[in-house]
Image: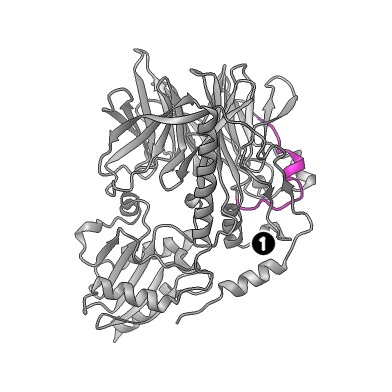
Amino acid sequence: MHIRLYFVCFLFVFSSCSNNQVSVKNEKEGKLNSTYQLMVSDEKKIALDSETPTRPPYMQIYTDSTGNRLLTFLNSYKNSIYFYDYDNSSYQKKIVYNREGSDAIMRVAGYYIKSPDSIYVYNMPMTEVDLTDSMGKVKNRISLRTNEPDWPDRYPQYWLKTVNPFIRIGNKIYLTGQTFRSLTMSNIMNFKFTACIDMLNNAIDFRYTYPKEIYSDTNWEDGIATQVYPCLSPDGNLIHSFPASHDLYVCELNSNVITKIYGGSNVATAIHSIDYDEPRKTPGELCLVHYVQQDMYGAIIYDNYRKIYYRFLERGIPNATIQMPMKDKLINVIIMNEKFKYLGETTLGTGKEWNWANSFVTEEGLNIEYLDKNDLDENYLIFKILTLKKIKLMTVLNKYITNVLFLGLFLFASCEDKIEKKEKIFLSNAIERLSVNQQYEWVILLPGIGCHGCIQEAEFFMKKHISNEKILFVLTNIESLKILQQKTGVEIKSHPNVYIDRNNQFKLPTDHSIYPCVIQVNQGKLQQYAFQSPKTPALYNLEKLLKQQHKE
């Protein structure tokens, strides 16, 4: 049952080289001097209910008419906006949006609270912004797309986040979208990634284009490098941070003037596009590995209290393999003054601990969501609050040496085991350590991170067969049990045939760790195994076998 096709696929990939690969150099790499750093000065913890996971996809700090600061965030599986008092962390209320009926919002994917009775909600499946009241009733709908079949080639799609929010300027709100496809010279100047909505009459116009020197006629497939992060400057201009650019692009609102200004990192290296000839046929695995290997810039945030900018950088892992997710990358925060002069940068840790997509500024400092590995039941939404501190020359030198050593060790670990460990031995040992009950004939290994479609197939299979006493489901490398329960409708802890692998003892040390695995066992011993992947439909084959056994 065990079929190996991965390396054959990649031999083909590396033989398909492109002549249009772009290399975006960092002219100031290693030449910048740090005088400031960020230090953790405080922590904020918010107790969550049993239906709300950590890592909410969208947040907004909102100050009400009485001056109370409210932290609002989205529970996408409940299609709800939750309101908490930021200062005392107490729950206030929630707004639940119906998925059906005249007030239907099929999936809330972002919002802007203008006032308690004027809340603009992004309805992702319909690609529209809906104006709602505090009860979730829809007042108006504003479409952001056309009925033309090729509209994704001409209009943006929107992947809103806390760090890519609705931005209000006067009577207009700006939604920054993106393309998920590579752009050609013929359409790059026509593709405008920002929707500008006039709140007075709901008129829409589209503005701003990608820098053609980086994004034209080259392969940036899959949407990671084409995400655009906006920021409103204190003088009322929009600043755009592109993942593949060390520069920032300052756009004047009332003119077509765009000023490019350096806003890069002292440690970021050249950023390369994907070396593959036909962008839209680029294998998803190649895209994933490529972006993990590359330095990639993230959001830019202005701190009005301290008059500085923060810009995020996900540092590349040059020797990354398919089993390494984006969250393995180190996160840096670059600090700049109002004139974009470099002041320093701080390495936080990896994305496994720091969810930088949920970052915002308050009087207390820069708030960044922190993921506590000991909070396995996701009882708290945690923010570390970072503040600016001036550093001495020797501190800068020592920190630089520490970062270099840490990165060196990290890369060394990334290169470990170039010779693939035999999966059969690994799985046999894992099953033996678990002392799998002899009643089980099958073990389904379900990873939380990896091939999205493959994992969805495994989740559906678990939901359908959760009552089968001959199948043991092992959940490994899980990001959120709450989200998994909401997606499948399975109360995990109430089923004895579900094992939660909290220590990742079943996480394969090979490139196949991104796929669900079907393991046949007999008397608690491994017999054979196969993966649910784009090439090997192990769950489909098992489904057929179970149906056949049922008939017999």
Q: Position of residue 450 (x, y in %)?
A: 47, 60
Question: Is 207 within the magenta?
Answer: yes
Give residue 297's quadrant in the image: top right
Asked which secondary structure carries label 1, the reply is: helix
Tell me if 141 is positioned left or right of 362 in this view: right
Query: In front here: 477 or 256?
Result: 477
Which quarter of the image is occupied by the C terminus? Answer: bottom left
Which quarter of the image is occupied by the N terminus? Answer: bottom left
Q: Position of residue 429 (x, y in %)?
A: 33, 75
Q: Position of residue 398 (x, y in %)?
A: 51, 38
How many callouts does the rendering have? 1
Residue 70 appearing in the image: yes
Give residue 541's quadrant in the image: bottom left
Residue at the image point whose x is 68% and y is 55% from the top: 274
Residue at the image point whose x is 24% and y is 74% from the top: 436
Crowdedness near tag 1: few (<14), some (14–19) or many (≥20) residues, C-alpha within 10 Å: few
The residue where tag 1 is placed is 281
Q: Give the dominant element type of the magenta stretch: helix, strand or loop.
A: loop
Query: In front here: 307 or 548?
Result: 307
Q: Say how the picture is coloured.
A: one colour
Tell me if 79 is positioned left or right of 38 in this view: left
Q: Residue furthest bottom?
A: 552
Tell me which segment is drawn in magenta: 206-222
Q: Position of residue 83 (x, y in %)?
A: 33, 29
Q: Compared to 16, does 101 lie above or below?
A: above
Q: Amino acid at mark 1?
A: Lys
Query: In front here: 141 or 448?
Result: 448
Residue 117 appearing in the image: no
Question: Is 501 within the magenta?
Answer: no
